[in-house]
Image (tube, rainbow, N blue to C red):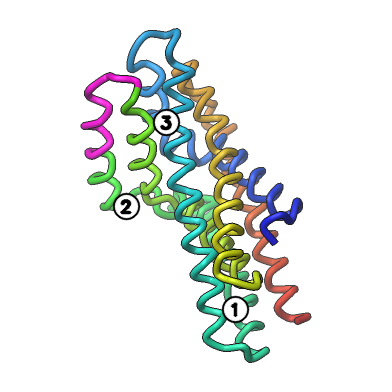
Amino acid sequence: MWTNPELLASFFLTGLLGGAGHCTAMCGPIAAVVGLRGEKKGALARSLLYSAGRVTTYAFLGGVMGASGNLALLSSKAVWFQKGVMVGTGVLMCLLALLQSGLFPGNPGLFSSTPGGGVIEKAAGKLFSSGEAGVFFPAGLVLGFLPCGLLYTALVGAARAGAATPSWGAGLLTGGALLLVFGTGTALPLTLISLSAGHLPLRGKKVFQVLASLLFFAVGVSFIVKGVKF
């Protein structure tokens, strides 16, 4: 499962589109600070260190979810249980994707503002305040835990993918790989922001956010179909 090119590609594209839409709106200011926090010639190195830290956290969380999905499935080998996991996860992914898209009036995107995020941002802010290049990787590690609806949707998908693997170790690799490519996709637009300290037009960000959400919706539908046909 973790070498499935179609699933890896869908997670990467979702991360890329979500990074150009949702992430530039939520984390764009942070990425701009990374680019401006020091000499211009070091902006790329700072951005890559920051992104590497954030993607590392994503891969860790994905591995945990993938292994958890496999272990949860071991609690019962009944066919009805496995069908329920597939269909239930697919429905949850579809729901989260629609909420995250911001298509509904009065809903800017799921978890766009969550109380716990302030604590995480303050912790990362203390690291940024030193201005040394070495702090950007650990700051990225910390900021990888920021509440994010698109990330949560990816983690649900990682848990489902892990449930389809033969062991918890394979589930860990599957979930880690999926979130690694997802995080890499989100890193590309944020790196551009760090280098330019600019922002995409609001309309462009909205389109990318919707496309990313619809792609994850499609992955959720595929899980439902597989569960029904199981």
Q: For the residue carrying disc 2, how many other residues have a C-alpha within 10 Å: few (<14), some (14-19), or many (20+)?
A: few
> What amino acid type should be assigned to the residue bearing mark 2?
Thr
Q: CA distance from mark 2 to mark 1?
A: 28 Å
- Say whether marks 2 and 1 touch (CB < 8 Å): no
Q: Please tell me the numbered disc located at residue 114.
A: 2
Above or below for 178 versus 193: below
Q: Which residue is mark 3?
A: 50
What span is colored magenta in the figure? 122-133
> What amino acid type should be assigned to the residue bearing mark 3?
Tyr
First in sequence: mark 3 or mark 1? 3
Q: Quadrant of the C terminus?
A: bottom right
Q: CA distance from mark 2 to mark 3?
A: 22 Å
Mark whose residue sits in front, 2 or 1: 1
Q: CA distance from mark 3 to mark 1?
A: 35 Å
Mark 3 falls on what kind of element?
A: helix
Q: Which residue is mark 1?
A: 85
Q: Residue at x 66, y 43 (%)?
A: 13
Above or below for 135 versus 207: above
